[in-house]
Image (spheres, rainbow, N blue to C red):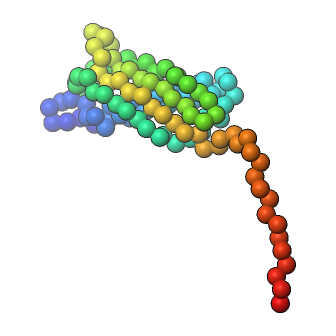
Amino acid sequence: MYQCSSYVSRACCADIVEAGTYSPILTSGLLTGVDTNGFSAAVNSTFHSPAHVGTQLHVIGTAVSVGSRSLSTRCETFYKATSRLLVSATHSVTPLFMLSKTPTAKTKRTKGRL
């Protein structure tokens, strides 16, 4: 996806950032044994300069924290030839299955009166 002026669109950059931020979460989840299935709570992206169509990009994703309640990473996308920063982003993920420390209350069944 590109714009009329032969720059890569921001939506395409956001897809690249999402792939660059979610892969460290999956990798660290496999290493630590934490379930990383979840949904994106927030993706904060800053576009520093445009990327031309056909340029080679260098994407660096870093896991900031991987826990049972929240997962967060950051990603930086560089122009490979000059190491110019194009996009930087942080991604917060909320796990689907949080470990609960309180037991669930059991409901009592009562017979109805006729």
Q: Quadrant of the C terminus?
A: bottom right
- Residue that protrudes farthest toward the top in the picture: 82
Residue 42 falls in image quadrant: top left
Q: Residue at x 77, y 48 (%)?
A: 103
Lateral position of residue 18 relative to residue 38, left or right: left
Q: Residue at x 69, y 28 (%)?
A: 33
- Residue that protrudes farthest toward the bottom in the picture: 114
Q: Quadrant of the N terminus?
A: top left
Q: Residue at x 30, y 17 (%)?
A: 85
**Along the line of sight, the residue nearer the viewer: 44 or 5:** 44
Whether residue 89 is visible: yes
Residue 78 falls in image quadrant: top left
- Residue that protrudes farthest toward the left in the picture: 5
Residue 108 position in % (x across, y down): 82, 66
**Along the line of sight, the residue nearer the viewer: 4 or 61:** 61
**Along the line of sight, the residue nearer the viewer: 46 or 21:** 46
Residue 56 position in % (x across, y down): 32, 18
**Along the line of sight, the residue nearer the viewer: 109 or 32:** 109
Whether residue 19 is visible: no
Q: Residue at x 46, y 28 (%)?
A: 21
Residue 74 position in % (x across, y down): 44, 24
Height in image: 86 above or below 108? above
